[in-house]
Amino acid sequence: MVKTEGTAGLVHKNRGREPKQRIPKETRERIVKLAQDNLRNASCREISEILEEFYNKVFHPRQ
């Protein structure tokens, strides 16, 4: 890579791109609002389970 592209070949090719699996901003904001209001006493795992059960959405608790 360095021979053909120089030092630019050392930079990761996905730099500056959003990951495909990233949760959309609007969805993240809605989850945060739920967590701060209705679910403020719930753990990350509990929030994840509630989202899966009631909203049919599966999110990793630490995502």
Image (cartoon, grey):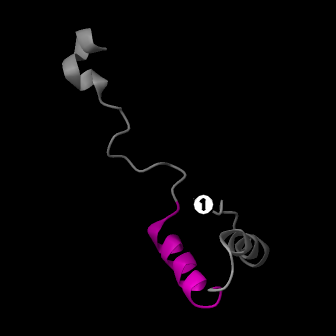
Q: In x, y percent, where is residue 24?
A: 49, 65
Specify whether residue 30 is painted magenta. Answer: yes
Q: Secondary structure at mark 1?
A: loop
Asked if 60 appears above or below 51 in the picture, the reply is above
Determine whether, in the image, residue 53 is placed left or right of residue 26. Answer: right
Residue 26 on image: x %, y %: 47, 74
Q: Check the image and name the residue furthest to the top.
A: 3
Quadrant (top left/top right/bottom left/bottom right) for the N terminus: top left
At 29% from the left and 24% from the top, the residue drawn is: 10
Report the residue that reaches farthest toward the bottom.
38
Which amino acid type corresponds to the residue marked 1 in the rendered image?
Arg
Q: Which residues are magenta?
A: 23-39
Q: Is residue 6 left or right of residue 42?
A: left
Above-or-below relation of 32 to 17:
below
Residue 47 occupies which quadrant of the picture?
A: bottom right
Percent x, y of residue 19: 47, 48
Q: For mark 1, what is the residue?
A: 62
